[in-house]
Image: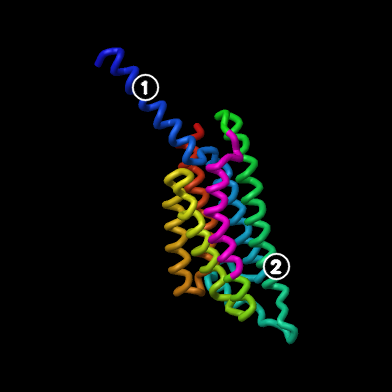
């Protein structure tokens, strides 16, 4: 292969890299995924604590106290607050680490690609939140965790065309766990911890080792 052919191949590779940078948000951090997964595991442990549930038990529904006469439940309020805190911290941590990665690569964190990524993630999350609110309204608590997993997985899958391919796999696995949890509602908490905790840690480790080392 002569020098001219080498130059042509290098030019083609540069064009591919430019196209990938223009169509995919490549600043997502594996370390952020690991931290988010760790937080989800801690959040699951807090749920065990709030419910006063033995670590060896799986069926968390047995430990949720019934609503009072006014339709209130402090346990449910604590659990919802726990989940909201995880999602908010996950977004903040993801944004901070993505900004650092973008700065290292000389990329912008807020461009057309990142906006498309957020838009494609936001819609399924929004619809899922409304659905969860309706489940709470009708007191169908056993389906809240399956819905969280399913819609979060749909959000990841929907946004994966603008990010790493590994996000598509993570999204599909979360959807699968959500569907399993919709039938095995007693194990919803364990499946939630696997989907938001263990899978995120594994995903983050893969992203870090492939793209950040």
**In this rendering, would 17 be left or right of 126?**
left
Label placed on residue 61? none
Q: Position of residue 8 (x, y in %)?
A: 33, 20
Residue at image x 49%, y 54%? 156
**Which colouring convention does the figure follow?**
rainbow
Q: Which residues are magenta?
A: 108-130
Q: Residue furthest right?
A: 70
Q: Position of residue 15 (x, y in %)?
A: 40, 29
Q: Which is in the foreground here, disc 2 or disc 1?
A: 1
Q: Residue 113 versus residue 73: which sits nearer the camera? A: 113
Label placed on residue 10? 1
Query: Regarding mark 1 in the picture, which secondary structure is present there?
Result: helix
Q: Residue furthest left?
A: 1
Residue at image x 61%, y 75%? 134
Q: CA distance from mark 2 to mark 1?
A: 56 Å
Mark 2 or 1 closer to N-term? 1
Q: Is residue 180 magenta?
A: no
Give the quarter of the image for residue 73: bottom right
| Contact (Cβ within 8 Å) of mark 2 with mark 1 | no
**In this rendering, would 24 be left or right of 49?**
left
Compared to 179, does 87 lie above or below? above
Dot 2 corresponds to which residue? 78
Q: Position of residue 121 (x, y in %)?
A: 54, 54
Q: Within 10 Å of the Cα at label 2, are there few (<14), some (14-19), or many (20+) other Cα atoms?
A: some
Query: Regarding mark 2 in the picture, which secondary structure is present there?
Result: helix
Q: Is residue 112 magenta?
A: yes
């Amino acid at each position: 292969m002569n020098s001219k052919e080498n130059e042509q191949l290098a030019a083609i590779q540069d064009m591919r890299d430019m196209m990938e940078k223009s169509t995919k948000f490549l600043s997502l951090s594996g370390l952020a995924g690991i931290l988010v997964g760790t937080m989800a595991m801690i959040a699951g442990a807090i749920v065990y604590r709030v419910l006063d549930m033995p670590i060896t038990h799986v069926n968390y529904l047995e430990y949720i106290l019934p609503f009072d006469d006014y339709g209130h439940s402090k346990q449910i309020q604590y659990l919802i607050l726990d989940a909201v805190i995880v999602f908010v911290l996950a977004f903040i941590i993801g944004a901070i680490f993505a900004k650092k990665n973008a700065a290292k690569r000389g990329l912008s964190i807020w461009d057309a690609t990142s906006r498309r990524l957020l838009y494609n993630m936001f819609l399924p999350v929004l619809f899922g939140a409304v659905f969860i609110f309706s489940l709470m309204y009708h007191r169908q608590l056993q389906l809240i965790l399956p819905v969280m997993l399913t819609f979060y997985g749909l959000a990841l899958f929907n946004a994966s065309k603008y990010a790493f391919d590994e996000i598509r796999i993570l999204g599909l696995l979360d959807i699968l766990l959500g569907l399993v949890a919709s039938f095995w509602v007693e194990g919803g908490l364990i499946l939630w911890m696997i989907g938001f905790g263990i899978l995120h840690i594994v995903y983050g480790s893969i992203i870090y080792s492939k793209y950040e080392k």
